[in-house]
Amino acid sequence: MKLLQPIEINGMTVRNRVVVPAMVTRLSGEDGFVNQDIIDRYVRYAKGEIGLIVVEAMAIHKSRSGPLLRISEDQYVPGLTELASRIHDTSDSKVVPQIIHFLKVARSGWRQTLDMLSLEDIDLIVEQFGDAVARAREAGFDGAELHAAHAYTLASFLSRVNPREDDYSGRTLEGRLRMIARVMENVRGKVGPDFPVGIRFLADEYIKDGYTITDAKLIGLRLAQLGFDYLSLSVGGKFEDAIHKQGEVPYPYTGYSGDRCMPGDWYPPALHAHLGGEIKAFVNGKGFSVPVMVAGKIADPDTAERLIADGVVDMVAVARGQLADPDWVKKVKADRRDQIIQCDYCNWCKILDGTHQKVRCTIWPKDALQAPEYALANEVPAWPEAGAGLKAEYAEGAVTLSWSKAVGSIAGYDIYRAEDSGDIKATKAVKARRWTDRTVMAGVKYRYRVRARDESGHPSAPSQAVIVAPQPAAAGFA
Amino acid sequence: MKLLQPIEINGMTVRNRVVVPAMVTRLSGEDGFVNQDIIDRYVRYAKGEIGLIVVEAMAIHKSRSGPLLRISEDQYVPGLTELASRIHDTSDSKVVPQIIHFLKVARSGWRQTLDMLSLEDIDLIVEQFGDAVARAREAGFDGAELHAAHAYTLASFLSRVNPREDDYSGRTLEGRLRMIARVMENVRGKVGPDFPVGIRFLADEYIKDGYTITDAKLIGLRLAQLGFDYLSLSVGGKFEDAIHKQGEVPYPYTGYSGDRCMPGDWYPPALHAHLGGEIKAFVNGKGFSVPVMVAGKIADPDTAERLIADGVVDMVAVARGQLADPDWVKKVKADRRDQIIQCDYCNWCKILDGTHQKVRCTIWPKDALQAPEYALANEVPAWPEAGAGLKAEYAEGAVTLSWSKAVGSIAGYDIYRAEDSGDIKATKAVKARRWTDRTVMAGVKYRYRVRARDESGHPSAPSQAVIVAPQPAAAGFA
């Protein structure tokens, strides 16, 4: 498979074309230090033999935020060194941290915008990026990635709605590109030419008056000219259309651009791959061979293989798919993709992130902070019919689920329930193929799934979800 | 060219694959009657030998609106008969009216939503659609098109954010589709099976939680099952993300979904054609051969030809391109596409629509209500260099334009100026190749273009636009 072939990125040999892009975990404290949960999360990815692991965004400055890693001072280097070294000890996965600067946001909904930055502020940010990448090198990471996507500072410079009117002016593409050029110059001055430095940016802002693929191709070209070692594409995720809930810090994934950034189950698969393809074709056409990767509901190995084999992009970024199952690559390698536990894009992970809770996946075991490790089984429990025959009936305040008998030596079934509100509950194993949930309330939408487990703990694929949305009676709640 | 081959639509022979889709003109009065300006607008399209002309939306009910055609009562039939007959007398263009129902909107920003409709309201709308299509047939139109796109009633039923919870519930696709099924049943009951009835709907709502191509394919299939004779795809244009200016009626093209619906010059060409293609492939794959057409920055005949020749879609809808130049088809037929006056997507037409002004095009002669008619010339004035060498300099409150000498027997030059505010001014012809505009103000953005005219009145292509955005001095306006 082309998907499993190595690729060279400025001297870093990545063993396959699969990337786990930066995903917020909310596992660190507000102090920004690496802790055991963080190490466990990334070691788990390394066990999965993922080609390139991008560690969640770490900040180059001290601005308050929720739980977030920091790389803003030397005191963070030992923890980061431990993280990199534990990952390297685990497998030959390569690992780079994502390096971020963000502007201030307040619970009132106020947010600092680019035009509030003085030239001195800008100079400081430039230095901070360079210093942060130098620390990444010192900590033993294989490279670093600059975060110029979504709602963050570098992306705001690149944005078509950049409000500045000076040398960094949003009125011209050159003005929008000036900051990233200065940052890269500073970075290279501090880490030299042979340290892999990638960048993540937006293929489309997906906001009113925002830039589209038309500008993204040119931005990609400039980034290649500046010597970035890979281009990683995302879309949307902006503050401009964020929905502000009173008293909460605005979250840039609540508006339409947030829908696009982490597309839910009503979006088609691999929906942004063609944008990555257009950027790659354009940049290659100008004589640059910089690897291009793209994210967005690429969950199926056949789709991923096709994208690589057809030369649409050089690498695929599988985020939620590998959160659900960090053994995605390993199972593809073993030709056991039937055992991949598929993300169904319920976006519970997104809700947890948005509410600053530790990011987990609904289809992990109850209360688990990390994906479980199952040995590859020759046989795993299977469902005799599509969707596992899962049915739900609502009556008098209770939902009764029933499902088909799984095939195999079944020890029991796990039931998963998610709510719109983001709360999730999973019962312990039940033996029966029927279960009644008496804790539902009219007016809330529930999503249930069930999985079978065999006697060695191997899980079946999750059933399809059934959604139950009991309605309040016309004259009030039932 | 495949683009120029006829196509049969339920007995209506359309002579080529080019459609001018419904565009609001604001040329009628608020009384809703056809007037001379309306007739002139559509006769002008017919002169251009466009395959299918879709007359702007006409309402099936009396709700207040700005200037808008009506088909809600028999008193409108004579005017509509005159319109259809004048078009038919002009060329063999086929013509169908677009039939619309919309909910109420107020200057306060309040708007009626679908859940406010009683079952009796719904029954009435169903009958009104049927009656309106019957009037279209009586008036001599070749067919009719139901408007189930953008921010209007039928689209709100189809929407993924349809808030109803009854038989028309937004919780299921079947619920969302129920209304259109009832409407079509009523229509067919009143006009029979042999009157072409098309429908325009959204390939993607482009709003938060809105439906995407995933649902649009299924909606397209159902519409084919219901016996619609063509599927015409648009995108976006919703109230959900409209930006409300105090004291103004909300306009559903002011948000991001409005950007997508009438994409400006920063969007790539033919940007939604692939969505039309996905719907066509899916519906065809289910055994239906209903013609599919798509709109969205399809301005270039080569692009249009490729879409038809490759079987992506069956017809192309060229809206702003044919507003700019209604002789688009005629010039393609004559193999003189060099003479097509290209829309540059400045969206002045959109601004005029949004402010209820008569919709015109910036590149028509000053104050013209209709596109001018020029005989095809063997030679037209040409620019010796790309962009006509147009330059603009701002100093002390004045913009000085200069440009290259056009090739040919030049009588003079026309200068066009558009402002962000939507006001447009064009000077009369100037002889010189230099002109100073002393009526500009810092803080406003201006867009200039120039065209040469020869002694027979034939215009050159417009120059590229130059944009001047004089800045207020830091301490106040200069």
Image (cartoon, coloured by chain):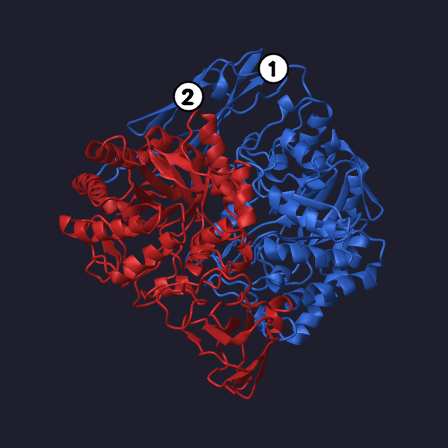
Chain colours: A red, B blue
Local secondary structure at mark 1: loop
Chain of the residue where label 2 is placed in the rendered structure: B
Instruction: Tell me if B237 is positioned left or right of B311 in this view.
Output: left
Q: Is residue B372 above or below residue B114?
A: above
User: Is B281 or B41 nearer to us in this picture?
Assistant: B281
Percent of width and height locating residue B414: 51, 23
Same-subunit check for callouts 1 and 2:
yes
Q: Is residue A245 above or below residue B78?
A: below
On the rendered image, what quadrant is the C terminus of chain B found in? top left
Q: Amino acid at mark 1?
A: Glu
Local secondary structure at mark 2: strand
Location of residue A94 (image quadrant): top left
Percent of width and height locating residue B72: 71, 60
Q: Amino acid at mark 2?
A: Trp
Does residue B308 appear in this view? yes
Percent of width and height locating residue B207: 50, 56
Which residue is rendered at x = 48% and y = 43% of the image? A4
Q: Is residue B76 above or below residue B264?
A: below
Chain of the residue where label 1 is placed in the rendered structure: B
Percent of width and height locating residue B6: 80, 36
Which residue is rendered at x = 17% and y = 51% of the image? A78
Which residue is rendered at x = 80% and y = 51% of the image? B196
Q: CA distance from mark 1 to mark 2?
A: 21 Å
User: Is B122 or A53 nearer to us in this picture?
Assistant: A53
| Residue B455 badge | 1
Instruction: Tell me if B344 is positioned left or right of B322 in this view.
Output: left
User: Is B41 or B45 nearer to us in this picture?
Assistant: B45
Query: Callout 1: 10 Å neighbours few (<14), some, many (20+)?
Result: few
| Residue B347 badge | none
Residue topped by disc 2: B435
